[in-house]
Structure formats: C-alpha cells, structure tokens
Image (tube, rainbow, N blue to C red):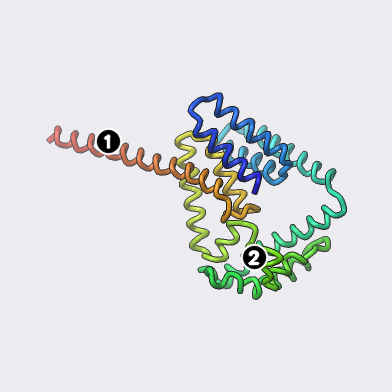
Amino acid sequence: MFSATVLSLGIASAYLSERKIYRNIFVILTFCLLLLSQSKGGILIIGLSGFVVVFLKRPSFLRLITYLSLCMMATSVAVYFVIQQATAINLFQATGTFATRISLAIWTLIVVLHHPLGVGLSGFYEAFRFYLPPAMDWLSRVSPFPLDFTEVQEYVNGNMATVPLDTKCFFFEYVAMFGLPFLVAYLVFSKKVLEALLARKQDLLMVGFVFLMIGMSTYINGATHYAGFYLTGLAYRQYLLFKKENRAKYQVRLDRTTLHSSTTA
C-alpha cells in the first residue's frame, strides 16, 4: 500500500506541476522513496509498467529488447535482494502470505464459475465458508513445498478480529462480488483510458495508470487506496478530453461536408 500511495501521489504531483524542473524533482523523489522503502512488489511493477508503456508505443525491435532486458535485470536484482534478506522466520511468513493470496485467487475463480454474476455484498463472506476450503485443498495438493494455511483458515472461520475478510486484491474482490459484468467493465475502462493516454502522449500518467491496473489486479486492495483513485481520475479525465476532441473533429468534418455539398448544389 505504501509503494502504491507513493507512486500515485508522486506521479499526480509531477503531472500537475506547471514547470518541468518541479516535475522532474517529483519523479526523482518518487523513485527514491520506492527504492528506500524496499518495496519489492512496487519496484518490480514499476519496471513492468515502464515496459508495457514502451510496448504500447510500438517501438523498434531493438529498443523493445533493450527495455525487456532492463526489466529482467531489475527482476533478478529484486529476487536476489529478497533471498539475501530472508531469514527462516521471513520464509515461514512468506509461505503463509503466498498461501493466502493464491488460495484467494483460486477461490475467486471458483466463485465466478458457480456464480457468473457474482455473490453480491451479502453473499461475499458466506462464499468464503463454502468455496475457500476446496481452494485450499487443491493448492496444498499441487504445491511443491508445504504451505502455512493458518491465516487463510481464519477466513473460513469468519474471524474478523484476527484477519480482515477481504481478498487482499481489488480485482479479485470485485470480480467475486459482481462477477463477469465487473470483469468486462474493468477491461473496457482500462482499454479506453490507455488508448486516450497513448493518443494524447501522456506517458507519465500512462506509467502510473498501468502500475495501478497491474497492482490492483495482483496485490493492492484498492478499497482504501484513495490516492490511487485520484490518479485514476486524472487518467480518466484524459479519456474525456480525448473523446471531446474526437467529437469536435467529427463535427468539423461534418460541417465541411455539408458546406461542400451546399456549394456544389
């Protein structure tokens, strides 16, 4: 959550800065905070977001390979850092976190298969009791190493005093509650905003938007991520401006066609 908040506020501040020097300062400070926070997920996803933006801009093959190599190097360094810093307690806690997140991802898939339109707000907690045990059983059978299901078991027990009953991921949570309609809306919204950012050459906002879309589809619980929704709103505003520009261009072409037709007549 810290990495996502830092990036959202940093990119929003850079985007709203009127002078280039202030914009550059905000970008540098944002990346420094990400590095100092040692947020492995945040660093990996910002690298992946940069590569996605470059890919969407359709660069030359050589440039694409160069950026891909840089992203792979960043991933390798982050993985090495995790291994070096890990202790026996860290590894045990990591298996618990991994078991919780993967179990909830599998649980979401099971919920959607049984309820394509979602379980709604009222059925969300009850769905944990029905569909989470099969997800845990399947994961324990296919996992190549033993996992700690202590935390995820509390979801089945419904003990909100121990763990918050959410999926730890905005995307999984809302797909489970609202089903395939939300999935379609999520993808359509992302596509339209990305097309507008690409057309209006808003690279900085595009990096932030892609970061949020990937982050909220993997590890960020967006319900309390207010800064992220502010940055998403700035990106969506670009879509509204892009749509307004297209309407204006269409109206100009229509007026010219009408004028030409009347002149010919």
Which quarter shows the C terminus?
Answer: top left
- Horizontally, residue 133 falls left or right of residue 234, namely right
Disc marking residue 252: 1
User: Is residue 172 placed above or below 29 in the rendered structure?
Assistant: below
Q: What residue appears at the point 63 percent right and 35 percent down from the top-left corner?
A: 30
State the residue position of label 2: 165
Residue 188 versus residue 149 in the image, above or below = above
Quarter of the figure with residue 70: top right
Residue 40 placement (x, y as % from top left): 72, 44
Give the residue type that dot 2 points to.
Leu
The nearer-to-camera label among 2 and 1 is: 2
Task: State the SS at label 2.
Answer: loop
Q: Is residue 139 visible in this depiction of the protein?
A: yes
Task: Name the outermost residue toward the left.
Answer: 265
Q: Residue at x 44, y 40 (%)?
A: 238
Instruction: Tell me which amino acid carries mark 1.
Output: Val
Q: Depth check: give the residue in front, 198 or 120.
A: 120
